[in-house]
Amino acid sequence: MKALKGTYDGEHIQLDEDVELKKDSKLLVILLEDEEEWAELSTKNLNRAYGESEPEYELSMVKEPNSEYESR
């Protein structure tokens, strides 16, 4: 599954990026009235995925550090 942004030009849905779709590919289109709705939807889904019961992970629990990660 992949989320793609696009716009409707009054006749067709125009995707913001090129993507190859197979004939009869199933699509789910969600109409967002503005960019704020998109951000709100993303936040809700992140909160659902990482809820209050999500444990806190200590640095000492990391078994294999990601060498490409830049510590902040």
Image: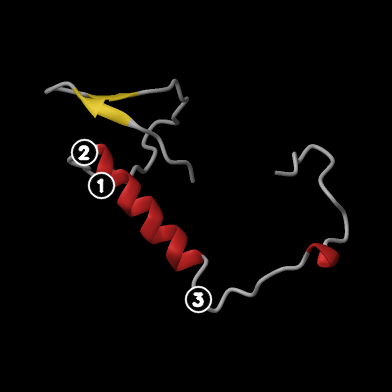
Residue occupied by mark 1: 37
Which amino acid type corresponds to the residue marked 1 in the rendered image?
Glu
Q: Which of disc 3 and disc 2 is earlier in sequence?
A: 2
> What's under tag 3, amino acid-wise?
Glu
* 54 to 72, vertically: above or below: below
Q: Residue at x 25, y 27 (%)?
A: 7
Residue closest to the eye, 1 or 7 = 7
Q: Residue 37's spot in the image, x, y percent?
A: 25, 47
Q: Secondary structure at mark 2?
A: loop
Please give the name of the residue rendered at 40% of the width and 35% of the height, measured from the top-left corner.
4
Seen at 17% across and 21% down, the residue is 9
- The furthest residue to the left: 10
Q: Position of residue 14 (x, y in %)?
A: 28, 23
Check the image and name the residue furthest to the right. Answer: 63
Q: From this viewpoint, which residue is outermost toward the front?
A: 72
What colour-coding does the image apply?
secondary structure
- Decide: few, some or many residues near mark 3? Use Cα within 10 Å; few <14, some 14-19, many ≥20: few
Q: Are marks 2 and 3 in contact (CB under 8 Å)?
A: no
Q: Are marks 1 and 2 in contact (CB under 8 Å)?
A: yes
Q: CA distance from mark 1 to mark 2?
A: 6 Å
Q: Quadrant of residue 62?
A: bottom right
Quarter holding the C terminus is: top right
Q: State the residue at coordinates (50%, 65%).
A: 49
On residue 34, the disc is 2
Q: Which residue is disc 3 drawn over?
A: 52
Rounded to the nearest angstrom, the CA distance separating label 3 from label 1 is 23 Å
Is 20 positioned to the left or the right of 29 in the image?
A: right
Where residue 43 sits in the image (x, y, percent)? 39, 55
